[in-house]
Image (spheres, rainbow, N blue to C red):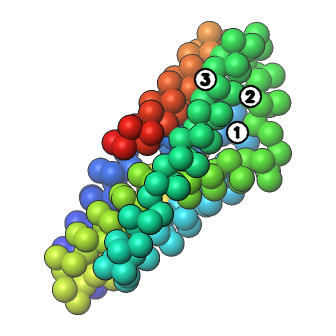
Amino acid sequence: MDMTAYGTGLTTALTLILAIGAQNAFVLRQGIARAHVLPVCLTCALSDAILITLGVTSFARVAALLPMLDPALRLFGAGFLLWYGAKSFLRALRADDALQLAATGAGTLSQALVTCLLLTWANPHVYLDTVVLIGSLSTRFPGSEAAFGAGAVTASFGFFFALGYGARLLRPIFERPGAWRALEAAIGVTMWAIAASLLLGG
């Protein structure tokens, strides 16, 4: 394996996913609540792996399709993020008991997975980061595109599992209702900011 390509793929993917976005905020919340952490982290990482593989193997063809998919994805994704952000703001206003909120607000496994999939697959930024950017950068390593993609996939798995399971270390802080309200409000702001970016074409 070309370790240079692998290392570049690893660092590139980490740089792209470190920013707090809709997907990361959701994983963080699930981790603090200790709710469905394994399936949520696995869903995020596997989704990234699929998209990264698609970008590394089929960048040119996918890039040609993106102009048709982009407007629809932006509207659908923005609508979902506005709805999810509103729910976070409502939870922030009603969070009288942080631990009770963590237990009841997490929802069922199916609800968590549906939300996770929508936050991933309905967000055009995910496609731009994984399919377009990682896919295009992989072409700089002719014959070693697979190593580049493997590095990016490794970064995704490592990041999401570290975020999901590392978040529980913050649980003592979020046993205070005020801290949980602040987290929910921050998630709401993040969701609405991303929705505004999608609607404005950013």
Q: Disc 3 or disc 1, which is closer to the eye?
A: 3
The answer to whether mark 2 and mark 3 are in CB contact below 8 A is no
The residue under label 3 is which amino acid type?
Glu
Q: How far apart are labels 2 and 3 at the CA level?
A: 11 Å
* Residue occupying the point 77% across, 31% down: 105
Where is residue 34, by image quadrant? Answer: top right
Instruction: Identify which residue is drawn at 80% across, 39% down.
Output: 107
Q: Is residue 201 above or below residue 133?
A: above
Per the image, the residue denoted by label 3 is 184
Circle 2 SS class: helix
Tell me residue 2's x, y (percent): 23, 82
Residue 44, position as x, y percentages in the image: 56, 57
Quick one: SS at disc 3?
helix
For marks 2 and 3, the one nearer the N-term is 2
Q: In the image, is 75 to the left or to the right of 124?
A: right
**Where is mark 2, residue-wise?**
102
| First in residue order: circle 3 vs circle 1 | 1
Disc 1: which residue? 34
Say left or right for 110 vs 19.
Answer: right
Instruction: Give, as a three-letter code, the residue at label 1.
Output: Arg
**Residue 153: percent from left, percent from top:** 42, 68
